[in-house]
Image (tube, rainbow, N blue to C red):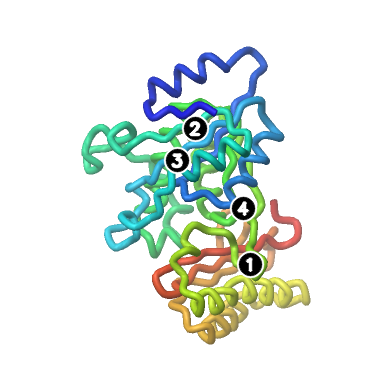
Amino acid sequence: MHTETTIAGIRGRLRDVRQPGTRIGLVPTMGNLHEGHLSLVDKARELVDRVVVSIFVNPLQFGPDEDLERYPRTLAADRDKLASAGVDLLFAPDLAEIYPKPLSRTTRVAVPELSDVLCGASRPGHFQGVATVVNMLFNILQPDIAVFGQKDYQQLLVIRRMVEDLHLPVQVVSGATLREPDGLAMSSRNAYLSDSERVRARELYRTLRWSRDRIRDGVTDYASLERQAADRLAQARCRLDYVAIRQAADLSVPDERAGPLVLLAAAWFGAARLIDNILLDGAD
């Protein structure tokens, strides 16, 4: 596996491997890799001839009071995991390579509506930061496909909308959420949890499953179901951000003509803000 830290270097490597008929896949990450990330690599390897992984902790998607400075950086260990997973190229640029100008003067990409609800409401500017850096990576690497995890479901929709609206020649593929044996969705931020917080954090997925089962039983009063789910999560002594039932296609509030649904939740357990979701039957 080759590692490149500059835009010129990674473009040169890709010119060498991009032959007619050769498909390139990208798995964008912020590093501190776990089995969930590696499952996205495996999915990409099934679909393309060459797999590129990027590792870049993107400051534009962190708010002023968020965990940018203490976000885990584990590049050496990440490199070993990716090499063992059969990755062809690693792109690991530093801050100045991606943002040569001050962040306040950097061009941004905004995806309206999808970026302003749920996580976007509590983390203003987050999805603008995500869309900006992903658009940069697409321009730098020019992949045929890009694989993103379903755990970050709102992010997945934002990126798909950006690709559609900007006519980018990239196929966006989702990879299933991988879970720990206790049901907790794999996340780099799980490392922030104490033992007791981790036990309480299990309730996030349990509550989503409970809500899913109520809907499968025929419950259609979604607002009432959201309140009940919030009450369940309150028992876990978390600081709830939201628990929501939305249409899977665009995160709009469902009505009696609702299509496939997605259940989403975000909550703080100690210093860790965790998110999770479940797609209901028929959702893609």
Q: Which of marks 2 and 3 precedes in the sequence?
A: 3
Q: Which of marks 2 and 4 precedes in the sequence?
A: 2
CB under 8 Å between callouts 3 and 4? Answer: no
Residue found at x 44% / y 72% = 268
Identify the residue position indicated by label 2 in the image.
Answer: 90
Camera-side mark, 3 or 1 = 3
CB under 8 Å between callouts 3 and 2? Answer: yes
Is 270 placed left or right of 227 in the picture?
left
From this viewpoint, is residue 118 visible?
A: no
Residue 258 in percent (x, y) is at 67, 62
Above or below — where is 99 with respect to 191?
A: above
Is disc 4 surrounded by few (<14), some (14 to 19) or many (20+) residues within 10 Å? few
Residue 231 in percent (x, y) is at 55, 85
Identify the residue position indicated by label 4 in the image.
Answer: 249
Residue 284 in percent (x, y) is at 69, 51
- Report how far apart the C-alphas of labels 3 and 4 lie in the structure: 29 Å
Residue type indicated by callout 2: Leu
Residue type indicated by callout 3: Ile
Is disc 2 surrounded by few (<14), some (14 to 19) or many (20+) residues within 10 Å? many
- Report how far apart the C-alphas of labels 2 and 1 lie in the structure: 45 Å
Residue type indicated by callout 1: Asp
Camera-side mark, 1 or 4 = 4
- Report how far apart the C-alphas of labels 3 and 1 lie in the structure: 40 Å
When asked about the image quadrant of residue 110, the answer is: top left
Residue type indicated by callout 4: Ala
Q: Nearer the viewer, residue 205 or 57?
A: 57
- Report how far apart the C-alphas of labels 3 and 2 lie in the structure: 8 Å
Identify the residue position indicated by label 3 in the image.
Answer: 55
Residue 249 in percent (x, y) is at 62, 53
Is disc 3 surrounded by few (<14), some (14 to 19) or many (20+) residues within 10 Å? many
Q: Which of marks 4 and 3 precedes in the sequence?
A: 3
